[in-house]
Image (cartoon, rainbow, N blue to C red):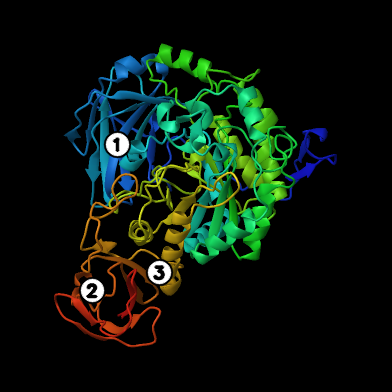
């Protein structure tokens, strides 16, 4: 599929006409139809989805036998017709002969039916074949086993209808090559920037904390229920300095980051680029002369950085009507489901429907961005709350057809993403069942967008601990900055990023291109507490995170000016150590390995003020 923007004048003078011409340029990968009675298999997302036709009748119920390739903690879900949900909630569910507590709760709707979920998680292992039996007065459509982390993160797992097509695209050579790049990249910069940055976290003398909803700066319009015309008028004050792109790209490079993702359009509907599909953009709604997204894209390419865009597809408070709130609320009331009202424009919705917005703005703008940025590496969707399964799949498929090398995150909806995240400032546990690659997005203080009064900055140790925790589990860290209205990054944030960069550049071999080792971590709490801060403040000489590459294991520490290291995970049971190197140094430290630990003498070798990393050759 080609995207052909029709020529015309700048901004509003140009018609919104992005012509999508379907050509056989990128052949759509064939997806084999799954026979209902085919063998049950665990999917790439770790889920096991079983139809009634795959069950064996036994007594008063049905029994499914299934293989499990990954031991872990799961949640059992039943899929039923909505009219049978009430009766199905009292179903008796057993996993490997063990009865679950019940009763099941109504979770969400997919095209296959209503998803009911058992509140109790079940741990399954070792790997092998297992059974689920269900006795229900109501007819069943499916039984599903979903990783607990999906349920805890409130991720809606889609129906079987689209999965074969999604899987064929996800497994294409182009997507897999892109994922390999992404896994090696490890560390990126997130940028939340827009009209709200000019307000700096306050509106007419009131701070965000006095408004509704989340207290982060980019939710300004929602927090104070600002009428659309008033917010549009305020946008005229947004006039960044042209140096922003060069400065931000340089900061990302100095910090050791490999990719940059910017909010091309957040929930307020304002586009940071010149869009033909809306006049609420940098070209028409402000006096700025230029295209902020394209300028940053070019600056990042000059620094050798990959580029991605954030796009809020589900929420658009300026032109997205009520976000489909009224229709979803009416449906949920009939079905006994709770409706999350957060993030929907119920105070001053634009004319038309949410479906109109998708057709006239969201789909075309995503196509515009792909055409504008030929080397775009990923699209970071957000705000999927009331997006339907068909709409989410359409976004994923459209991106693939326009450029199959572009990765899509899971927030496109219904787990159609190429990779996973556990939520803002949240990192999965090492014990979580993750068969997809994951990325953690995190803030440097408490807000994503710029709040002039938010000085609760995480320390360099906090941020590095997050990075090492994530890398040791095989994930990516997307760390946010919130520039002010001129595009300047707060100095405290710059200083923290520079401190991180010193550690990252000195120890890059342990981060980039490395994979998880058999042990992720020793000597301290497993991961940061909520919000991305450590549960213990001081760096500990006993704490290490690990990664691996070929015959090398990397032991990463944040202990300052260390003179020695004792690493229990690298005792002789781990293998025979044949060499030890302090990254960033040509000196060869003295070391000794026995049945208890690997001990390394670091005296006089210049282990850094932010910590260090050891490269251990292991047989």
Q: Classify residue 41 as left or right of residue 285.
A: left
Q: Is residue 391 above or below residue 533?
A: above
Q: Secondary structure at mark 2?
A: helix
Residue drawn at 47 percent across, 32 percent down: 159
Say few, some or many: other residues with alpha carbon within 10 Å of mark 1 (under 14 / 14 to 19 / 20 or more).
many
Which quarter of the picture shows residue 246? bottom right
Q: Is residue 240 above or below residue 51?
A: below
- Of callouts 3 and 2, which one flags the residue occurring earlier in the amino acid sequence? 3
Residue 163 point in image, percent of width and height: 50, 39
Say few, some or many: other residues with alpha carbon within 10 Å of mark 3 (under 14 / 14 to 19 / 20 or more).
many
Between 547 and 177, the one nearer to me in the picture: 547
Residue 430 point in image, percent of width and height: 29, 54
Q: Is residue 366 above or below residue 84?
A: below
Observer able to see residue 433: yes
Q: Classify residue 457 as left or right of residue 202.
A: left
For the residues labelled 2 and 1, the Cα–Cα distance comes to 35 Å
Residue 604 point in image, percent of width and height: 28, 85
Q: Nearer the viewer, mark 3 or mark 1?
A: 3
Observer able to see residue 33: no
Q: Which residue is mark 2?
A: 570
Kindly identify which numbered label has been placed on residue 541: none
Q: Classify residue 101 as left or right of residue 155.
A: left
Residue drawn at 24 percent across, 60 percent down: 538
Kindly identify which numbered label has been placed on residue 75: 1
Q: Which residue is mark 3?
A: 503
Would you say the residues marked 3 and 2 are in contact, meaning their CB atoms lie under 8 Å apart? no
Q: Secondary structure at mark 1?
A: strand
For the residues labelled 3 and 1, the Cα–Cα distance comes to 40 Å
Q: Classify residue 325 as left or right of residue 296.
A: left
Residue drawn at 34 percent across, 82 percent down: 581
């Amino acid at each position: 599929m080609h995207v052909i923007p029709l020529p015309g004048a700048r901004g509003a003078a140009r018609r919104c006409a992005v012509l999508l011409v379907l050509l056989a340029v990128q052949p759509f990968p064939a997806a084999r139809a799954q026979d209902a009675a085919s063998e049950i298999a665990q999917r790439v997302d770790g889920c096991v989805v079983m139809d009634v036709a795959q069950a064996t009748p036994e007594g008063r119920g049905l029994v499914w036998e299934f293989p499990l390739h990954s031991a872990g903690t799961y949640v059992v879900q039943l899929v039923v017709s909505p009219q049978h949900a009430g009766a199905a909630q009292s179903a008796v569910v057993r996993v490997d002969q063990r009865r679950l507590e019940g009763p099941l709760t109504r979770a969400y709707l997919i095209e296959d039916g209503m998803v009911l979920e058992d509140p109790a998680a079940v741990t399954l292992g070792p790997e092998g074949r297992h059974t689920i039996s269900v006795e229900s007065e109501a007819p069943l459509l499916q039984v599903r086993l979903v990783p607990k982390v999906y349920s805890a993160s409130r991720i809606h797992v889609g129906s079987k209808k689209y999965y074969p097509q999604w899987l064929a695209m996800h497994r294409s050579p182009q997507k897999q090559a892109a994922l390999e790049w992404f896994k090696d990249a490890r560390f990126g910069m997130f940028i939340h920037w827009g009209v709200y940055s000019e307000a700096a976290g306050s509106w007419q003398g009131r701070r965000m904390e006095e408004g509704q909803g989340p207290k982060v700066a980019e939710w300004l319009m929602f927090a104070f229920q600002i009428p659309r015309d008033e917010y549009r008028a305020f946008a005229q004050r947004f006039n960044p300095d042209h140096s922003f792109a060069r400065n931000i790209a340089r900061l990302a490079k100095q910090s050791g980051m490999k990719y940059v993702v910017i909010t091309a359009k957040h929930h307020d509907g304002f586009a940071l680029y010149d869009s033909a599909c809306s006049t609420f953009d940098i070209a028409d709604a402000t006096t700025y002369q230029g295209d902020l997204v394209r300028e940053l894209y070019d600056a990042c390419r000059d620094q050798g950085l990959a580029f991605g865009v954030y796009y809020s597809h589900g929420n658009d408070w300026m032109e997205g009507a009520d976000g489909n709130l009224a229709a979803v609320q009416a449906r949920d009331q009939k079905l006994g489901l709770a409706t999350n009202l957060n993030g929907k424009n119920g105070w001053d919705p634009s004319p038309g429907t949410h479906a109109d917005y998708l057709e006239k703005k969201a789909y075309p703008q995503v196509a515009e961005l792909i055409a504008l940025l030929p080397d775009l590496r990923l699209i970071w969707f957000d705000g999927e709350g009331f997006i339907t399964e068909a709409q989410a799949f359409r976004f994923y498929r459209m991106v693939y057809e326009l450029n199959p090398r572009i990765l899509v995150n899971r927030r496109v909806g219904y787990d159609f993403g190429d990779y996973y995240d556990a939520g803002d400032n949240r990192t999965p546990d090492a014990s979580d069942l993750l068969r997809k690659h994951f990325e953690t997005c995190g803030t440097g203080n408490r807000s994503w967008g710029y709040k002039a009064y938010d000085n609760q900055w995480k320390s360099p140790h906090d941020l590095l601990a997050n990075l090492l925790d994530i890398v040791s589990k095989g994930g990516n860290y997307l760390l946010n900055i919130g520039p002010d209205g001129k595009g300047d990054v707060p100095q405290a944030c710059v200083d923290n990023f520079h401190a991180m960069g010193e550690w990252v550049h000195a120890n890059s071999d342990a981060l980039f291109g490395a994979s998880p080792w058999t042990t992720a971590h020793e000597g301290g709490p497993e991961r940061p507490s909520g919000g991305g801060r450590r549960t213990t403040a001081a760096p500990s000489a006993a704490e290490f995170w690990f990664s691996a590459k070929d015959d090398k294991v990397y032991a990463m520490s944040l202990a300052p000016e260390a003179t020695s290291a004792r690493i229990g995970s690298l005792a002789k049971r781990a293998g025979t150590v044949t060499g030890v190197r302090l990254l960033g140094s040509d000196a060869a430290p003295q070391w000794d390995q026995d049945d208890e630990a690997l001990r390394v003498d670091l005296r006089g070798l210049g282990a850094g003020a932010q910590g260090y990393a050891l490269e251990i050759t292991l047989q």
